Image (spheres, rainbow, N blue to C red):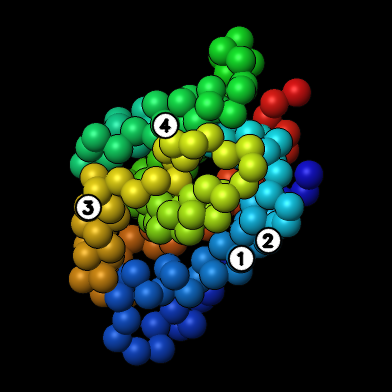
Amino acid sequence: MTTRNYRLPTRHAESPGPESALMSIRQMTRIAHQRLDHDLSLLSKPLSQQRFIDFLAGLLGFFQVWEPAVAASPQARRYLTGTSRLPDLTSDLTRLNVQQHEIAAIPACSAASELVRSPGLALGSLYVILGSRQGARVIGRAVSSAPWAPPEGLAYFSDDPRANAAWNGLVTALHQTPWPSTDPEIARGALKTFDVLHTWLTRSAIA
């Protein structure tokens, strides 16, 4: 699949006036975010069990590489304390009747390691991944009514106070950081994360 390259605006376009890094990155990643949501179509009717299996399996392969890479970054790892997604993803796949040998065979997303090559890239990637928890709750409520949904729900889409605290901490830091004096790689990391997720999650992870 051909991926789309998102070009960063020039410095002049980035700084029309006093603005926080949070607001700038949000604006710069809007198209990439919308593209990912549209192409995943998780909530298209009817809700498809296989679509969610493929999505969760793809995330498992992504987080298997991304979480250890972020944990190795001193500046970024504090936002991951106690918020590993791997147990929830494994549990959800099991609840959706994916066999253990299938889960063990899910490929890892090697490109995820490229998202944390510098502290700036890692923070931009964290903006995307931690922010995705906000939309996950909406998806969780929608999927709970699907006939194939497990009675206890899917853990990946549930509310997690620890993840919320990590997101709030990152938002506060970015909101207090003036733009464009901040590291431009933060925006590049966010854009690259959306691109990697799009390429990885729009392929079938379970054969």
The residue at the point 57 percent across, 50 percent down is 145
Location of mark 1 (residue) = 34
User: Looking at the rendering, in which quadrant would you find the N terminus?
Assistant: top right
- Name which residue type carries label 4: Asp
Question: Which residue is at the front of the view, 63 or 46?
Answer: 46
Tell me: residue 87, above or below residue 194.
Answer: above
Badge 4 or badge 1: first in the primary sequence: 1
Nearer the observer: mark 4 or 3; the answer is: 4
Location of mark 4 (residue) = 88
Give the label on residue 165, or none.
Answer: 3
- Name which residue type carries label 2: His
Q: Are marks 4 and 3 in contact (CB under 8 Å)?
A: no
Judge left or right: residue 12 versus residue 30.
left
Tell me: residue 33, above or below residue 115.
Answer: below
Judge left or right: residue 21 versus residue 14.
left
The residue at the point 24 percent across, 45 percent down is 162
Q: Are marks 2 and 1 in contact (CB under 8 Å)?
A: yes
Q: Classify mark 1: residues with Cα within 10 Å, few (<14), some (14-19) or many (20+).
A: few
Say which element carries label 1.
Answer: helix
The residue at the point 53 percent across, 74 percent down is 9
- Name which residue type carries label 3: Ala
Q: Where in the figure is residue 170, as x and y percent of width and height?
A: 26, 57
- Name which residue type carries label 1: Gln
Q: Where in the figure is residue 101, as x and y percent of width and height?
A: 61, 10
Q: Find the distance from the CA under tag 2 to the CA under tag 3.
A: 28 Å
Tell me: residue 31, above or below residue 59.
Answer: below
Badge 4 or badge 2: first in the primary sequence: 2
Q: Where in the figure is residue 141, as x and y percent of width and height?
A: 49, 54
